[in-house]
Amino acid sequence: MFVLFEEDGAFKAGTILADNDSSLQVETSHGKRVKLKSSHVLMRFREPSPGDLLNRAEAGAEELDTAFLWEVSGDDEFAFDAFAAEYHGHAPNAVESASILLRLHSAPMYFHRKGRGRFRKAPADILQAALAGLEKKRQQAEAIERMRAELVAGRMPAEIAGMLPQLLYRPDRNRVETKAFEAACVDAGLSAPRLLLQCGALESSYDFHYNRFLFEYFSEGTAFPAFEAPADPADLPLAQVAAFSIDDATTTEIDDAFSVTPREGGGWRIGIHIAAPTLGFARGSSLDAIARRRLSTVYMPGNKITMLPDAVVETFTLAAGRDCPAVSLYLDVTAALAVQRHETVVERVPIVANLRHHDIEPLFNEQVLHDHSGGPDFEWKRELTLLWDLANVLEAGRGKAEDNRNQVDFNFYVDWQTHTADGPGYVTISQRKRGSPLDKLVAEMMILANSTWGKLLDEAGIPGLYRVQSGGKVRMSTAAGPHDGLGVDCYAWSSSPLRRYVDMVNQWQIVSVLRDEAPAFAPKSADLMAAMRDFDVTYAAYADFQRQMERYWCLRWLRQQPGIAVDGKVLRDNLVRLDAIPLMVKVPSLPVMLPGTRVRLTVEHSDLLDVDISARFVEMLAEPDPAEAADAALEGN
């Protein structure tokens, strides 16, 4: 006698060795002996053999139509052997019964198990839902395979082309597009951005980095929403000055300008003029909402995303040939450059010139200023020289003279009309010595304006947003506090309202004091605290992105001239700072050398997606003197 039973979710057959009514000793077709409870036996039979039964039953089950079985079964619970008798119209043999059992068991969507060998047909609505789900999975599997094959072949499926940012930067692994994309990456042996470059979905590696930033911080795009045009504060008094700005050639958001006017009886009236967009729109306006959302202009080589719409910037930027709304700080100084008094006014300022670094610095620099012959003459020389002398007095008064003699600033210029092997954009990187007379002149005037207006708010009891430094750590605060690094009692960013929301907030507050009006942000304002926190986080993120893109364009610069040797200075261990571009490189092949040692390297490999570089040591150029070694070690830390 043989039995059919279920064990561990599988059907097995075997020969009865001993039958003790409540339990049986059975030897399976594989020779394994097991002890079974009688209630676990599904069927007893005499023929065929156990092994033959399962083989024939599986073949018979494949011939049965599951949908037809569901149609002819009743709505009540039933046993498989009773259903087999009804289906065949006669007492079924062992193979016929086992075939029915296997088919019912393998179709859980059609038949729900109710116990050993017992089933109940699924309700029609549940069955239809299950079948629809099964069909959906089948179609999804076909779609995944189709999209995967297209991607591997270098073609971009339309479904995936419409959701590239999500796939690259925040993939939803429940979507069929993501499953197909990730499967294609595995089959092609490529990372996600490399596969998209191969398919032509990314024009260049630049798009990968730039779009990732947009996805995180400008998910709705960089276009501005609709906004109300700013008001024209035409009733402002016109200043009797001739003001000029000093900026880089690419600057369009010109926030600050200066004027020098002789005073009767000697001395001068020095004007520091800051663009005043807050006179054109109020807190709570659509333009305020835009600036609050962006918080700052985003800078990067070859591009920028402005905080305010271009039309608003053009309205309030301190462009030459216009009378521009401004908040002006005037200093009355003696012939000996002693500041006697200061005054802040809201007015229109005639801007007569926009001076650019590349035009002025060849004529106004350290060498010229120390030239006893006076150097070449040029327009604005007298005003710049006076402001330079005043800047030195102000710097000495703060007790924080800066030594920038060995520091260099780098300027990036990207020609997007020129294409290279790495995509659109040919980068030029130029050097400019930090701490030039123009730099110091502007910096000292801005420090004076920001500290003076910070005190103005503090003394009026009006909250502002301050930069506070104590113990070496810089933080933002709504309460005035000393800035140890600058040597001032308080410092409130107010000089760049076209590009920083903090400065805009402070300008609203300053104007409220000057006009004796209710401030835009009251004391203990929760909105002011929220703006401060959001700005701090966002401004740091924008700065990180700018540094990352500068590193990216440094690699592009190197790839524009393959095979060149590059020189640099060892900072520590195997870290080298290059001379020609602002890039630090780890060089595993670098021998042990003192910080400050000058070396020559060759670039072996660079990766624009990972923004990584591999360089090899070529030779030592010069050993450092003790001072250089100390400076390099300090910089390396």
Image: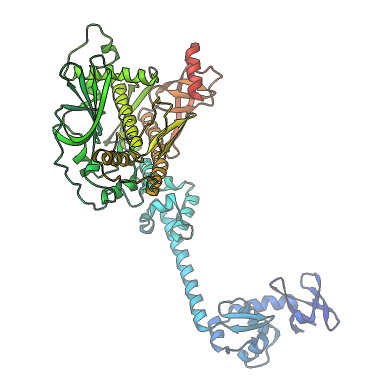
Of residue 508 and residue 103, the one placed in the foreground of this image is 508
Relative height, residue 226 to residue 557 (above, below) = below
Outermost residue toward the top in this view: 372
* Displayed quadrant of residue 305: top left
Q: From the viewer's perspective, tell me whether residue 144 is left or right of residue 434.
A: right
Outermost residue toward the bottom in this view: 89
Q: From the viewer's perspective, tell me whether residue 393 is left or right of residue 138.
A: left
* Displayed quadrant of residue 551: top left
Q: From the viewer's perspective, tell me whether residue 395 is left or right of residue 355.
A: right
On the rendered image, what quadrant is the N terminus found in? bottom right
The percent position of residue 91, horizontal first and vertical second, equals 68, 92
Q: Is residue 628 visible?
A: yes
Relative height, residue 194 to residue 91 (above, below) = above
Q: Is residue 65 visible?
A: no
The percent position of residue 499, horizontal first and vertical second, equals 30, 38
The percent position of residue 178, horizontal first and vertical second, equals 45, 56
User: Colour scheme used in the picture?
Assistant: rainbow
Relative height, residue 136 to residue 626 (above, below) = below
Of residue 430 and residue 137, the one placed in the foreground of this image is 430
Q: Residue at x 51, y 18 (%)?
A: 595
Q: Residue at x 49, y 47 (%)?
A: 189
The percent position of residue 475, horizontal first and vertical second, equals 44, 36
Q: From the viewer's perspective, tell me whether residue 392 is left or right of residue 279.
A: right
Of residue 407 and residue 514, the one placed in the foreground of this image is 514
Question: How many numbered badges does the structure rendering display?
Answer: 0
